[in-house]
Amino acid sequence: MAQISPRLARTYFAEISAASALPLDPDDLVHMVRLRQHSHVVIGDIAIRCYKNRSKWTYDERDIRRAAQAFADFRLDPGDVVEFQVPPYRERDDQDPEERGRADWREKIASWLYWHARRKQQEQRHYEDWDDSWQRIGFQGLPGDLTWEEFTAACSDRRQNIANTRPLELMTCSSGSLYVPRAYAGLLDRWEQVTERLVAGARACSRCRAEGPRWGAWRTPSPLGYITLCPPCSGAAFQRYTGHLRGVLYESARTRSNRADGYLCRLCSESRAAVWDHCHDHGLVRGPLCGSCNTYEGKSTAYSFLQNKEGAALHLLECRGCLERRTLPARYHSALARMHVEATERHSIRTRRCRHVAWIEDVELAHGAYRFQLSCWWHKKTWTKDVTVANADMLVTEFVDHALAAVQATAVVPAPRQSATDTTLQA
């Protein structure tokens, strides 16, 4: 079996399928956006398996060539079409959680249409005149007052993608109805079936066969790829971290002699850990994290991590240096200043205060202060707000104190210590 890299796989696929009647978009061969969910890339109705070899993800060259040739041979009659009817609008809260994110190409296209119909209304009317008319199908068979020409023009600079194909290049509008080539509609129907089979297979715990969440929360990395383990089975397979490296330098021999993949992730407590996370300001170990949580902490914005990840603050305080100083790493200071500005800053409309949360468009650190650029979309108002570094430091200290005060007596939160060894933070 010849293993090839993702970039080489995309090159081979693009060359072999260049004459395909389908508008293909095979970039997912490189990005692998569903890798954790089911370890495949699905192009059209063909699932291509991803393999992990020496810590790198690869493809079987034969799989790539067979799939590309199948699309090169795909027959499409542009004159043989079926009508596409836009499904009724549904609020997200009204949907069954199991249905959210399900492979459904009709709902996907409809979501694009409704989004642009709402945007058109909001751009053309004052916010006090907004209503739900954009949710109703108009005389042209599209939501609200949206026209097909407006929709396609708005999408011209976007790569709207379903099943790694571009459906808008094949859709047509005539006499108030939308049409899709019959062969293409059949391909997308099969894509739904293939994707749902992969998801169903990957949801089952490999030990007890319990069914997990749709989007791979139970999936944990292994030397040969992802495996599915429910929290009880993960807890039985991997030990929980109890803080034995707390205060130890990440670069120390003691850290290198302990493998992180023998522990559960300290943040999600569901997946096998992959790395030792550490504080970049103090160089001290915080604990073992799975690949997903480690990427989230390191690559997401500090604001997103604090707002959306449960236990984020206490994990950051596993760094002995941060805990003793009642602070957080420097990149989180502007995030807490932003949270403060969002909660408190509003502009005035005549004699009253705007009730809408301002949108923060930009932040820069200059002359000892974080300068936030704010805007109110509803009133077309923009302004700036400064938070001094000293005030931001006070907000960080208040945030840390509040996080520690909220911890139950049984929670594992380290206490400051008086002395340090050669592998710990020096006073």
Image (cartoon, rainbow, N blue to C red):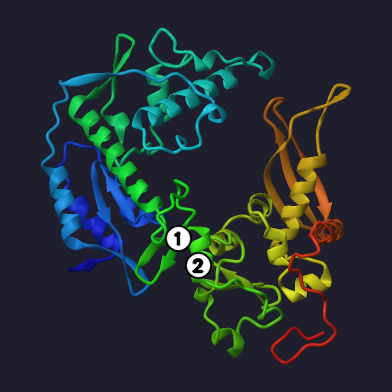
Q: Please, what secondary structure does the residue beneath circle 1 have? A: loop
Whole-percent x and y of residue 424? 72, 85
Badge nearest the viewer, 1 or 2: 1
Left or right position of 199 against 296: left
Instruction: Locate the N terminus by quadrant.
Output: bottom left
- The quadrant holding residue 4 is bottom left
Residue 236 higher or lower than 268, as above or below: below
Instruction: In the rendered structure, find residue 91 and report the number of the disc placed on it.
Output: none
Residue 226 to residue 180: above or below? below
Mark 1 and mark 2 in contact? Answer it, CB < 8 Å.
yes
Residue 163 visible somewhere in the drawing: yes
Report the residue marked by disc 1.
229
Say which amino acid is labelled 2.
Answer: Arg
Residue 277: percent from the left, percent from the top?
A: 60, 71
Q: Quadrant of residue 133?
A: top right
Q: Position of residue 226 (x, y in %)?
A: 39, 62
Dividing the image into 4 quarters, which one contains the C terminus? bottom right
Residue under the image location 21 percent in, 37 percent down: 22
Which residue lies under the disc numbered 2? 272
Q: Secondary structure at mark 2?
A: loop
First in sequence: mark 1 or mark 2?
A: 1
| Left or right of 62 on screen, residue 248 | right
